[in-house]
């Protein structure tokens, strides 16, 4: 069974990338609090980010220390949730992070650093047109960079229309009922300077048998934790199903989808949340980064990042993992 990559701090929501031949992991930094569990996620009360790195599977993991703190970002009030990082065409590093502003609304910010491990300096305002949580970047072979995002319930995705131009406060639940489509994750291509969206936000469609996944299909509908990687020229969109605690994935032929549901990557781990990233072809292998609450003995908001190899079958399907 894989061990936590670090045990001196709690870490979650690992977004991993290879920069200059080294693995860099951008996790949330969980901390203790007395909030208790609720569906809004108040217990995930994080105030900074650390970057981890390692040279190879099983190698020594370096904690590069605090890369950026909430107190350094004027628009942030609280809850720095799952981040990600991309390298721009200018060779600099762009850390994308969701947080609640002073009005209680989640938006996505970006901070810039010269090195993959930071430190990062935040832009004074969140990305225009951004909303909800869990930004994940994907840079395609042609250099186009995309930001995928969104998360239901505490992540507020259910409060928005498709392109995010209409916000309805205090919508607590996702849609439900016969014939109702599930809410989709969102995507926008990033500008060349990586600091803003280059286009309006689009809603992605996950299909089952060619039809949009129904809202009540909680084993297959998107909840949070978007991630995109490419395998054999096809786009793999992976995500958490939230209240059914699965890491699922769907495959498409464009970064904008549609993505046809393809199966489960990882069965439920210890803890309510499940969140991951996938690194394709690092020293010839594909790795899944994920978290669980084994180290904290099941405390949902005290999670630990792990990694393990994953493989594909001959048809490009990911072989399902058990925790
Ligand atoms: O870490 C806080 C939230 O928990 C993340 O944004 C979600 O994906 C879930 O892992």
Image (cartoon, grey):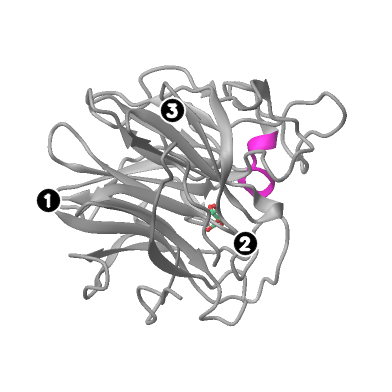
Does 144 sit above or below residue 171? above
Provide the residue designation for mark 2: 268
Please, what secondary structure does the residue beneath circle 2 have? loop
How many other residues sit within 10 Å of disc 2, few (<14), some (14-19) or many (≥20)? some
* Earlier-in-chain disc, 1 versus 3: 1
Magenta segment, which residues? 152-158
In 3D space, how far apart are the residues under numbered discs 1 and 3 (Cα atoms)? 31 Å
Does 9 sit above or below residue 101? below
Taking depth in this image into account, of 192 and 247 the one nearest to the observer is 247
Q: Name the spot of residue 252 as percent of width and height, x first.
A: 47, 26
Q: Which mark is residue 102?
A: none
Q: Name the spot of residue 248 as percent of width and height, x first.
A: 57, 45
Q: Which mark is residue 128?
A: 3
Please, what secondary structure does the residue beneath circle 3 have? loop
Provide the residue designation for mark 1: 20
Q: Are marks 3 and 2 in contact (CB under 8 Å)?
A: no
In 3D space, how far apart are the residues under numbered discs 3 and 2 (Cα atoms)? 35 Å
State which image quarter holds ligand 1: bottom right
Q: On the rendered structure, is 48 left or right of 85?
A: right
């Amino acid at each position: 069974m894989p061990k936590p990559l670090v045990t001196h701090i709690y870490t979650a929501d690992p977004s991993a990338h290879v920069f200059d031949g080294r693995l860099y992991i951008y996790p949330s930094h969980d901390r203790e609090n007395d909030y208790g569990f609720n569906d809004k996620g108040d217990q995930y009360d994080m105030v900074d980010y650390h970057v981890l790195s390692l040279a190879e599977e099983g190698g020594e993991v370096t904690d590069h220390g605090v890369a950026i703190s909430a107190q350094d970002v004027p628009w942030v009030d609280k809850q720095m949730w799952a981040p990600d990082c991309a390298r721009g065409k200018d060779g600099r590093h762009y850390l994308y992070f969701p947080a609640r502003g002073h009005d209680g609304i989640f938006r996505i910010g970006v901070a810039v650093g010269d090195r993959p491990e930071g430190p990062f300096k935040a832009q004074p305002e969140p990305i225009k047109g951004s909303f909800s949580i869990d930004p994940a970047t994907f840079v395609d072979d042609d250099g186009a960079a995309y930001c995928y995002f969104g998360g239901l319930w505490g992540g507020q995705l259910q409060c928005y229309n498709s392109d995010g131009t209409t916000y309805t406060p205090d919508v607590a639940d996702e849609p439900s009922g016969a014939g109702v489509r599930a809410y989709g994750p969102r995507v926008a291509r990033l500008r060349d300077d990586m600091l803003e969206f280059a286009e309006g936000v689009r809603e992605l469609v996950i299909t089952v048998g060619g039809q949009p996944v129904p809202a009540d299909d909680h084993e297959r509908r998107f909840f949070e934790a978007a991630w995109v990687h490419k395998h054999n020229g096809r786009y793999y969109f992976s995500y958490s199903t939230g209240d059914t605690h699965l890491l699922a994935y769907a495959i498409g032929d464009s970064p904008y989808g549609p993505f046809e549901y393809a199966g489960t990557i990882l069965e439920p781990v210890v803890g309510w949340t499940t969140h991951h990233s996938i690194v394709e072809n690092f020293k010839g292998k594909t790795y899944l980064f994920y978290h669980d609450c084994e180290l904290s003995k099941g405390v949902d908001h005290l999670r630990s990042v792990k990694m393990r190899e994953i493989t594909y079958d001959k048809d490009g399907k990911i072989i399902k993992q058990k925790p």
